[in-house]
Amino acid sequence: MSLTNRAYIIQLSIIGFLAIFSTTISKNPVLPLYASSLGANDALIGLISVISPIAGILLSFPVGVISDRLGRRRMLLFAGGIFLTAPLLYLFIADPLMLIPVRFFHGMATAILGPVISAIIAERFSVTKGERIGQYSSATLYGRTLSPLIGGLLISFFAITPGLFRYQSVYIAAFVAGLIVCILIFRIPGDMKGIDVTLTLDVFVKSL
């Protein structure tokens, strides 16, 4: 199944929107509230909050190189699996320390998604790659902007619910978004092989 260029960039943009929505709603504003309700002190909350960006710093560069070797679609499928499963892990946490590996695991998905989709766009839209990367980036910003608002509304709506469900409801919403991301990634046709390491490095440097 082949997609037109317009349908292709729309699909990538929806993936970016929902993926960033999923990871951001898992963090803002719910994460410090959830960690605190589990007994975390201020120092531990700060550590939990910084783990996901650390995953991005450590993995973004090697992910680009690996995707040149293994193919873009395989890497996206791996990221999709994380977007799908990571939100569910939050539901079973009883010790705030367990939020640290879960946040790192969740951060891996974002670390994979950004460089790989940027490389895909650069390959497919060689003439208009700046415009298309900008379109994709705008979609992710919409997701990043809306997620704290929706997360806050969910917490407020379930405020009268006993226990931790008002926080867990946010992670259920993140799971639903991750599920759609997985479905859309599976609908990407074929396998997208890298053009070379130089292009991925160039995309990575320009994204900084």
Image: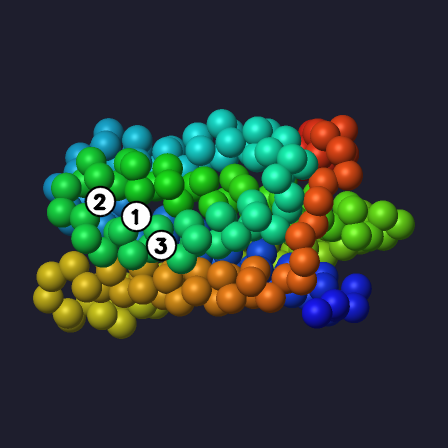
Q: Position of residue 192 (x, y in %)?
A: 69, 50
Q: Nearer the viewer, mark 2 or mark 3?
A: 3
Q: Position of residue 180 (x, y in %)?
A: 48, 67
Q: Is residue 90 left or right of residue 135?
A: left
Residue nearest the viewer, comparing 35 with 124: 124
Looking at the rendered structure, the kind of residue marked 1 is Leu
In the picture, the quarter occupied by the N terminus is bottom right
Classed neighbour count for the residue bearing mark 3: other residues with Cα under 10 Å, few (<14), some (14–19), many (≥20): some
Mark 2 vs mark 3, CA separation in Å: 19 Å
Where residue 118 appears, x then y in whole percent? 68, 45
Q: Residue beneath label 3, please?
A: 85
* Cα–Cα span, label 2 and label 1: 6 Å
Q: How far apart are marks 1 and 3 (CA)?
A: 17 Å
- Name above or below for residue 78 compared with residue 161: above
Which part of the image, by quadrant, shows the C terminus?
Answer: top right
Q: Pointers 2 and 3 in contact (CB under 8 A)? A: no
**Mark 2, residues whose alpha carbon is within 10 Å: few (<14), some, or many (≥20)?**
many
Quick one: label 1, few (<14), some, or many (20+) residues within 10 Å?
many
Asked whether disc 2 touches disc 1, contact meaning CB atoms under 8 Å apart, the reply is yes
Secondary structure, mark 1, is helix
Tag 2: residue type? Ala
Looking at the image, tell me whether mark 1 or mark 3 is earlier in sequence order. Answer: 1
Residue 9: x and y, percent? 72, 61
Going by the image, does 18 lie left or right of 134? left
User: Relative to residue 199, is residue 31 drawn left or right?
Assistant: left
Residue 202 in which image quadrant: top right
Q: Name the residue under label 1.
A: 31
Residue sitting at x 51%, y 31%: 59
Q: Mark 2 points at which residue?
A: 35
